[in-house]
Image: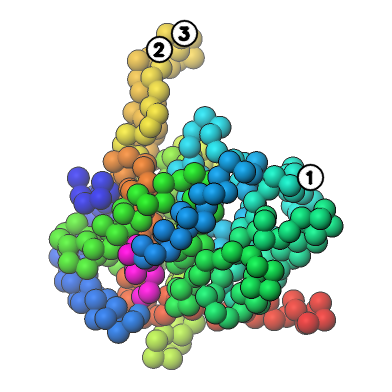
């Protein structure tokens, strides 16, 4: 097992398994040399103030502020509403789905991440404003979807005679922006997002830590795991540096084997929202039309969300017999908690007598292994990322590792993984349509 309870199996990416759609030994030997060179570049650029998201696990001050801000509010609200979109909500949603206490412990969580009137009306109908905690997350403070949600609920809080400062918290730029001014004017407690950390890389910042702490998640252990992964990326064993290998190899499959799609397929329902988070991270970071030197390129590899075993009955047919243009990343949890065992039932009546006495972890991981083998038999490459368990520390290491993999993919493409110039075009057009 590799460091941080996470390992990457690349067996089904080798040409001995998938023929001309894979790579040979020489390619993997060179992969290590490339990873070493890019690691040196990463460490040098960090010393120059770049890649600021890598500093987040060491930000003990923000962690303490998040815990201090959430502690006196615990037990005083029945619902938690997060107003934010993209990196301002997907990271928290991934944390909550993966790590929220089981058995109905904790408060119901509602995400307002769209201008869809049905969504806002539905959330409003489900909560009692007097017993609801709102967290508004926006780095700029001007994101249209977040402004709509903020305005909708702030108006109703005021109409009910409730102080915004008693029911709202904000996470935004420490000094500038519309939300910063609004929070200060209304005496709303707030936490900062570091100015150099983009939204899709902010999952380990207050953007997700504050609502996660309010939801009862162990955010201290989350950062501890992320810190271990970050340290390993600086000077750990290159042979165990799964983020570097994943980022570089995924890009190689796209550029050299025409695998224009990366299927992200966890065999774990609690990682379903992590797949949503990863889609934004990968697609928005790498889909670029210009290299760092300004020359033209069509960079990027579309991430596709799938969840096993559910999507064995939905998308897998396409993955196995449709266009051979995909590289699949499967995720497994070796020891889920709780694990369940199948005991006495007439399974044999359903031609499933082999299930009796089996642990469900064995069942679902066998399904993953079956999918990996089926893909290989059809010359479709896949890799398997194994998590020893799904606790807060391991999940923190996973998130940090996937962010690092994205940075390495940016290196391989020669693009800036931290900007998103094209996204603003549609926003500008929409604002003009609305008279802005």
Q: Which residue: 64% across, 65% down? A: 188
Q: Which mark is residue 196?
A: none
Instruction: Look at the image and tell me in which quarter the C terminus lies.
Output: bottom right
Using the numbered discs, state the Cα–Cα distance from disc 1 to disc 2 in whole angstroms. 42 Å
Percent of width and height locating residue 222: 37, 52
User: What is the residue that sits farthest to the bottom in this orientation?
Assistant: 294
Q: Say which quarter of the image contains residue 157.
A: bottom right
The answer, for residue 347, to whether it is visible in the render is: yes
Q: Secondary structure at mark 2?
A: loop
In the rendered structure, the answer to whether residue 39 lies left or right of residue 104 reads: left
Mark 2, residue position? 343
Q: Within the magenta stretch, is there residue 401? A: no
Vertical side of 232 occupied by 328: above or below = above
Q: Nearer the viewer, mark 1 or mark 3?
A: 1
Mark 3, residue position? 346
* Prevailing SS of the magenta stretch: helix
Q: Which residues are magenta?
A: 51-58
Mark 1, residue position? 125
Q: Nearer the viewer, mark 1 or mark 2?
A: 1
Instruction: Look at the image and tell me in which quarter the N terminus lies.
Output: top left
In the rendered structure, the answer to whether residue 252 lies left or right of residue 318 reads: left
Using the numbered discs, state the Cα–Cα distance from disc 2 to disc 3 in whole angstroms. 10 Å
């Amino acid at each position: 097992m590799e460091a941080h309870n996470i390992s990457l199996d690349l067996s089904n990416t080798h040409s001995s398994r998938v023929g001309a759609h894979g790579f040979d030994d020489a390619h993997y030997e060179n992969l290590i040399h490339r990873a070493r060179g890019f690691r040196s570049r990463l460490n040098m650029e960090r010393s120059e103030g770049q890649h600021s998201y890598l500093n987040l696990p060491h930000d003990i001050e923000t962690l303490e502020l998040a815990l201090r801000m959430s502690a006196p509010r615990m037990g005083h609200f029945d619902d938690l509403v997060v107003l934010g979109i993209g990196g301002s909500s997907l990271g928290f949603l991934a944390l909550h789905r993966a790590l929220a206490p089981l058995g109905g412990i904790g408060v119901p969580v509602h995400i307002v991440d769209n201008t869809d009137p049905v969504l806002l009306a539905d959330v409003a109908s489900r909560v009692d404003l007097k017993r609801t905690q709102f967290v508004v997350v926006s780095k700029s403070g001007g994101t249209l979807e977040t402004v709509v949600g903020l305005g909708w609920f702030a108006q109703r809080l005021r109409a009910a005679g409730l102080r915004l400062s008693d029911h709202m918290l904000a996470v935004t730029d420490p000094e500038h922006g519309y939300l910063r001014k609004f929070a200060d004017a209304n005496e709303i407690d707030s936490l900062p997002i570091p100015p150099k950390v983009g939204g899709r890389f902010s999952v380990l910042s207050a953007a997700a830590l504050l609502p996660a702490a309010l939801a009862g998640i162990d955010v201290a252990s989350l950062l501890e795991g992320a810190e271990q992964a970050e340290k390993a990326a600086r000077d750990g064993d290159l042979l165990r540096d799964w983020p570097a290998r994943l980022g570089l190899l995924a890009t190689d499959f796209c550029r050299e084997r025409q695998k224009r799609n990366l299927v992200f397929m966890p065999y774990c329902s609690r990682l379903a929202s992590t797949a949503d988070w990863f889609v934004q991270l990968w697609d928005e970071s790498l889909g670029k039309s210009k290299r760092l030197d300004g020359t033209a390129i069509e960079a990027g590899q579309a991430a596709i969300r799938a969840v096993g075993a559910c999507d064995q009955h939905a998308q897998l047919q396409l993955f196995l017999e449709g266009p051979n243009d995909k590289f699949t990343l499967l995720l497994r949890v070796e020891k889920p908690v709780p694990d369940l065992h199948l005991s006495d039932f007439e399974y044999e009546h359903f031609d499933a007598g082999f299930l009796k006495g089996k642990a469900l972890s064995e069942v679902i991981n066998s399904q993953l292994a079956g999918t990996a083998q089926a893909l290989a038999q059809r010359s479709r490459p896949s890799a398997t990322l194994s998590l020893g368990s799904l606790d807060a520390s391991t999940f923190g290491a996973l998130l940090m590792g996937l962010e690092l993999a994205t940075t390495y993919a940016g290196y391989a493409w020669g693009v800036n993984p931290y900007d998103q110039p094209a996204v603003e075009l549609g926003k500008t057009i929409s604002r003009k349509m609305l008279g802005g």
